[in-house]
Image: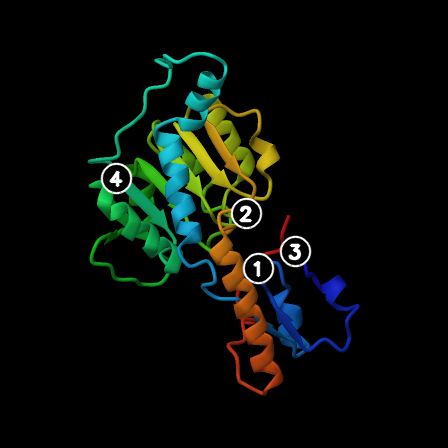
Amino acid sequence: MDLNASRLQQLPALELIITTTISTHFVDSGYCHDHGVQIINTANYTGASVAEHAVALMMAGMRRIPAIDQQVRQGDTNCFDFPGTELSGKTAGIIGFGNIGSYIAQLLSGFNMQLQFYNRSKKESSIAQAVDLETLVETSDVIFLSSPLNHDSRHIINPKRLQRMKRTVLLVNTSPDEVMDLAAVKAAVTKGDIGGIALDLLNADFFQDCPNTILTPRRAWYTNECFTRRIGMWKNTLIAYLNGTQLANQNAEDFVPIS
């Protein structure tokens, strides 16, 4: 997942890239634009899968389910060292309010939570309030990252914003790793500056020694239904291209290299 210019130059006859992902941040869109290479993504293939996984991460973190499960398996059936936190009355903030973010809000609406969101382009919602990013960071009890990676979202979670968060906040991620300054997030949760993290990311091993941490290895999308849907959508995109259909070219998107 790093189609940089040096790799793309080895394919001089290349005319089309169809990603199996929604995001195309790992493709050098500048090179593709200059060389007439179309980039087509597999939009909205995740359906409910990623949003449901994000809510599952929140539930596991707020009720400390993995830690309790581990203690029970070790013979401790009291587990009074792991009190949970009620969601009712708490504030959830969603950074990135596209299809996934808006569906997260829909799922959360049943928890009697106050819902707010930040999106770089204007969005409307009947169940969540649009706020500026700093307000969201400072007032949310749970923060969801559901933003694609671009120049605006890269390291949107950085040391300054981590310092502004509540010390009890749970940070939930289903976005590309680079929306966070990973070292800063690790330091914040290790020092207790934030309450916990529940992350679905490629670099999951980076956080293995952190307290109050729940990790999944970039598998938020990985359900039977989503896997089947993605294959079908990708094949249909290829068929449409070969049949001469005009497709939505993504090579004007912001390019942020993968570190």
Residue wearing tag 2? 178
Tell me, for residue 25, which label it has, or none.
1
Question: Which badge, 1 or 4, comes first in the chain's sequence?
Answer: 1
Cα–Cα gap, marks 3 and 1? 9 Å
Residue type, label 3: Met
Q: Which residue is mark 3?
A: 1
214 to 222, vertically: above or below: above
The reply to whether residue 49 is in sight is yes
Q: Quadrant of the N terminus?
A: bottom right
Disc 2 is placed on an element classified as helix
N-terminal of the two: label 3 or label 4?
Answer: 3
Which residue is rendered at x = 39% and y = 13% of the image?
A: 77
Residue toward you, 232 or 118: 232
Give SS at disc 1: loop
CB under 8 Å between discs 2 and 1: yes
Residue 98 picture location, percent across and down: 38, 60
Q: Are marks 3 and 2 in contact (CB under 8 Å)?
A: no
Query: Callout 1, which amino acid?
Result: His
Identity of the residue drawn at 49% across and 23% down:
211
Of the numbered discs 4 and 2, the one sitting upstream in the chain is: 4
Residue 22 appearing in the image: no
Give the mark nearer the N terminus: 3 vs 1.
3
Question: Are dots 3 and 1 in contact, CB under 8 Å?
Answer: no
**In the foreground, 221 or 259:** 221
Percent of width and height locating residue 154:
51, 50
Q: Which mark is residue 91?
A: 4
Tell me the amino acid under the disc marked 2: Glu
**How many numbered dots are placed on residues in this image?**
4
Sequence-wise, the earlier of marks 3 and 2 is: 3
Could you classify mark 4 by the number of other residues whose Cα lies within 10 Å: few (under 14), some (14-19), or many (20 or more)? some
Q: Are marks 1 and 4 in contact (CB under 8 Å)?
A: no
